[in-house]
Amino acid sequence: MGEVLDRFRDRALILKLAKLIKGLAKGLDKIRIMHVCGTHEHTITHYGLRHLMPPNVKLIAGPGCPVCIVPAREVDEAVKLALSGVTVYTYGDMYKVPGSKMSLAQARAKGGKVKVVYGFDDVLRKRVKEDSVFFAVGFETTAPTVASPLYEGRVPEVIKLLTSYRLTVPVLRYVLSLKASPIRGVICPGHVSAITGASAWEYVVKDFKIPAVIAGFEPLDVMIAVTEILKQLREGKARLVNEYSRVVSYEGNLRAKQYLKEVFEVVDGKWRGIGLVPLSKLKLKDEFSTWDARLYFEDKLRDIGEGDDIKPGCKCAEVILGIMEPKDCPMFMRACTPSKPLGPCMVSSEGTCHIWAKYGYLG
Amino acid sequence: MYIRVIAMCLGVPGRIVELKEGFRALVDFGGIRREVDVSLLPGVKVGDYVIIHAGAAISKVSEEDALITLKLWKEIAEVMGYGKRGSSNISSR
Ligand code: SF4
């Protein structure tokens, strides 16, 4: 199998597809294709796929970084708890994301209790004995990893959950509904789709009449997605295509979806840099309020303000909405670098600015 | 590699090498092994390839589908015309 998967990086085939894409794009006007996944951005930048695109085809990163879009206020909550002596467990990606005053990394430097884990299962294995918090961030893909043990009664009461889950399916709808949305095709996130199923994206085709392709994360996956989108645009027909059928089924992971339904309700939610997006956030249901950190630590969290989401001059909002590229931000690689990030998009290894900084942004 | 391992999304599939107590399994990523939660994938077996996300297996990878996809792309690129044959096979259902 490893061998099979290696062939998804076949250089000769990538270049052939690049030629094909050039041919298909000829005569079309400006085509902007949006993806909503940090891992897609990584593939595109790491393999230099933007350089293989003809000048009229632009690949744009939408709101696909789950830690970049967590509102500063929610980071502030985690920071406050860490500084008040509660152990806060979080993902490596979340660790350095700035809140309004500081990140969890900085809170730790100030004596706060912060521990980085790879997943929620790591926390469960630690046999935690005292009140602690898991800062639960992520999209449709990550939320089931907490919903499952919670529903199955495998989470001790001392582990409280500070949930900041958001949903990519409604946020893409929101972005596409914005007036003057320049997006002509969508590359749907492969791993979110592994949970939601390909069916979750049918609305892109039905309501917005633009091509949608669910794609994997090898360079060939992305190239084939672009090819398919251009082909549909040429034909004037929009269809939903599942290019990643080796992982994604039409109906998705039914067990995971069931857990999500049992444990969370879907409510309106704020996204850093975007604002309020209807029905885009997961909230713990009342039956699971014992684990809700916001209720349990109400006293400690009472005086937390709204928080300032975007620092003056930072263009993260525009970058997240696909209106601007990182290189168009005046701070990019000047006042804002991976070692001294100004905005959330420069922090996470999945943030667009960070990826551009790391893997090249010339041209 | 290390950076990618601590990041939440991993594009690379791992192979299940051992099933353990309590909904867990040992997974091998080309030499690096770690224990993951498999409660979202009832019925996984040793030898299965799975996609891991934030410490949990979220989906099985089908080798058969991977091979079909590859074959299709080859055809697509070769034919250059991106003819009728190609697209119908990778459609959703
Ligand atoms: S380069 Fe820095 S300041 Fe500019 S948009 Fe990105 S994160 Fe914000």
Image (cartoon, coloured by chain):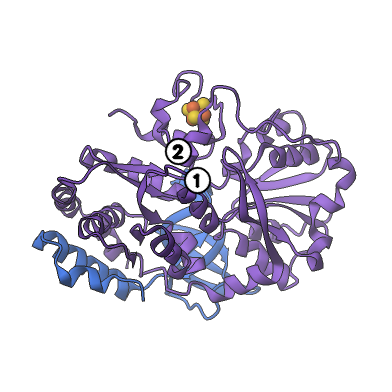
Chain colours: A purple, B blue
Given the image, on which type of amino acid does mark 2 rest?
A: Thr
Subunit of mark 1? A
Given the image, on which type of amino acid does mark 1 rest?
A: Pro
The C terminus of chain A lies in quadrant: top left
Residue depicted at x 42% and y 44%: A181
- Residue A311 sits above or below residue A296 on the image: above
* In front of the other: A297 or A324: A324
Residue depicted at x 39% and y 44%: A42
Q: Can residue B39 be seen in this view?
A: no
Residue found farthest to the top: A334
Check mark 2 vs ligand 1: CB closer than 8 Å? yes or no.
yes
Position of A286 with respect to A109 (left or right) is right
Residue that numbered label 1 is attached to: A63
* In front of the other: B93 or A117: B93
* In front of the other: A6 or A233: A233
Question: How many numbered discs, if any?
Answer: 2
Q: Where is residue A155 in the image (x, y as percent from the top left)?
A: 75, 65
Please state which of the two labelled residues, at mark 1 or mark 2, is closer to the viewer: 1
The N terminus of chain A lies in quadrant: bottom left
Residue found farthest to the front: A179
Residue depicted at x 74% and y 42%: A78
Q: Is mark 1 on a helix, strand or loop?
A: loop
Which label is found at residue A162?
none
Position of A90 with respect to A53 (left or right) is right
Check mark 1 vs ligand 1: CB closer than 8 Å? yes or no.
no
